[in-house]
Amino acid sequence: MAFYWLTLGLLATWRVAHLFNAEDGPWNIFVRLRRALGDGVLGDLLDCFSCLSLLAALPIAVLLAVDWEEGALAWLALSAGAILLERATGPVKKVAPRVQYFEGEEIDEPPRGDASVDDADDRS
């Protein structure tokens, strides 16, 4: 498979997955579809970009691959590339810091900084 076709396949995979996952579409058709599917299995599928990228990559890999081994690898590679592209272009997700309390330890405030477990034991 030529790099050119791999690049086109990657962009097409990202586009289809992003369209179903995050865009309204013309006449809000994708919003309506997501609402109609609700919280069921198919609704959950549309909420998961990684899952959608696997589905979007499958027909593209079949079209681009010469044999089944190349198709299997292309399927996973196209999905992985779409996920990386989504993470690179999507909004930054902030993760709450992990606060760990130890049994029997009274803490007025959560620990700050990069205190390790050993440092926390030294404070008692």
Image (cartoon, helix red, strand yellow):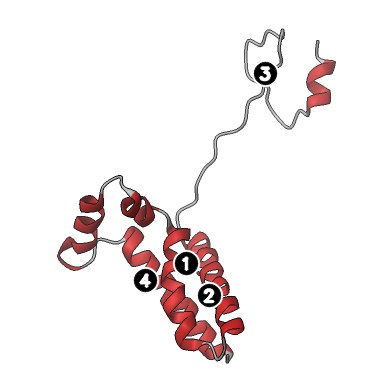
Q: In the rendered image, which residue does mark 3 sit on?
A: 101
Which residue is at the front of the view, 119 or 102? Answer: 102
Q: Where residue 32 appears, x then y in whole percent? A: 19, 56
Image quadrant of residue 11?
bottom left
Q: Are marks 2 and 1 in contact (CB under 8 Å)?
A: yes
The disc labelled 2 sits on which kind of residue?
Trp
Q: In the rendered image, which residue does mark 2 sit on?
A: 75
Q: Which mark is residue 54?
A: 1
| 40 lies above or below 86 | above
Q: Earlier in the sequence, mark 4 or mark 1?
A: 4
Q: Give me the C-alpha separation between circle 4 and circle 1.
A: 11 Å
Q: Are marks 3 and 1 in contact (CB under 8 Å)?
A: no
Q: Secondary structure at mark 4?
A: helix
Q: Which mark is residue 16?
A: 4
Quadrant where the image shows the N terminus: bottom right
The disc labelled 3 sits on which kind of residue?
Tyr
Of circles 3 and 4, which is in front?
4
